[in-house]
Amino acid sequence: MLVRDSEPEERRAPRARISDVAQALGLTKATVSRALNGYTDISESTRARVRHKAAELGYTPLSHAQAIRTGRARSLGIVLQVGDQDGQRPFVADFLAGLSSAASAENWTLTVATATTEEDMLATMGRLIDERKADGFVLPRTKVADERIRMLRRLSIPFVLFGRTADPESCAYFDILGEDAMVLAVRHLHGLGHRRIGYIGGGDGFYYSAVRSAGYRTGIEAVGLPFDPAIVGGGAYTVDAGMREADRLLAADEPPTAILCATDMCALGVCRRAMALGLRVGGDLSVIGYDGVPEGAWSTPPLATFEVDSRVAGLHLANLLIRRIRGENPADLRETAHARFLDRGSAARPMMSSAELREHVARATGRRSERRPDR
């Protein structure tokens, strides 16, 4: 037997419409619509009034209707290259949290996809564009010559770089000034008393690697030290590669008493190799990295490094991309910041001279030193 409630079913209040917001403010529906979508031809004060009134009336646009009307999915896209050894593993969670948080604040969504190769990445981005699942893209880890930029330029799709590139035409970006960090690191090591400061660069072709290498050269010149290619390595962005390059630099006729690395993973490899040779990191050999990966805090001694706030970077990039999609000039959407130096135990005053270090490495590896220690 069916028993009906004694009280009549409460009727749902009618949904607020854009016309209700327009009528309450004495504006046209077109003006309200453009204000809610962030168009810059509507003044900021009017946009704020419209947002306030819409919230007061409980008006929210239907996403599918808005997509049809504006041609936008209100979605930011990012494709992560998961098969890349020099990938975003240490930072991806915080980075995506920042992107998502900033997108949500504007009632946008974040579409995340993965790819294993550069070709796969381009194909995935093309599919997201064709299926209208992203209005624009965040491009992390930019290259000096980047095929993603070429493709998006050709298709007139908005994008923002986490990094920079050789040709900044039509590029909005947010970047951390890695070159300034390298200058600071060289000055710091020089101030501790190091006069043989080596350097190991990052991944070939990436813009961050180019600018950090340039920063090292600038720092060396600034403190009056000669540039010596014998104590400069490159292409090392893993622990194994860092160990390999450390062997090469420490085998030099005048090995470095300090090694500056473009990435933390390389720096951790240098530390591992130094300890295997019986060297005390932060005493016999100083090491500084860049990135602020969690592993560095737990190494022995803790790794001196430059920390990047990935969540804040995500917030900046999402806001810049939304503004770019809304039509702002990319030349007006370029921001930079500095990494924070974590002065930890792996960088200290030298306890060995370069000559003493050479002799120690020669004994540890069974090689005969070709030179006598400096007197």
Image (cartoon, grey):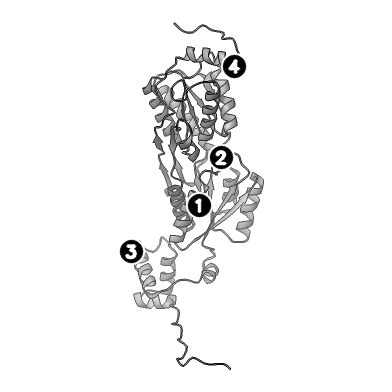
**Label 2 close to label 1 by CB (< 8 Å):** no
Residue at the outermost front position: 1
The disc, 4 or 1, on the residue closer to the chain's N-terminal end is 1
**Label 4 close to label 1 by CB (< 8 Å):** no
How far across and how far down the image is residue 306, in percent?
Answer: 43, 36
Q: Amino acid at mark 2?
A: Lys
- Which residue is label 3 attached to? 45
Q: Which mark is residue 96?
A: 1
How far across and how far down the image is residue 272, in percent?
Answer: 54, 28
Q: Amino acid at mark 1?
A: Leu
- Which residue is label 4 attached to? 365
The disc, 4 or 2, on the residue closer to the chain's N-terminal end is 2
Q: Could you say whether the residue bearing mark 1 is in a helix, strand or loop?
A: helix
**Real-space Cα separation, disc 4 to disc 2, in angstroms:** 38 Å
Q: Amino acid at mark 4?
A: Thr
Q: Observer-nearest residue: 56 or 207?
A: 56
| Mark 4 closeness class: few <14, some 14–19, many ≥20 residues within 10 Å | few
Q: Could you say whether the residue bearing mark 4 is in a helix, strand or loop?
A: helix
The disc, 2 or 3, on the residue closer to the chain's N-terminal end is 3
Q: Amino acid at mark 3?
A: Ser
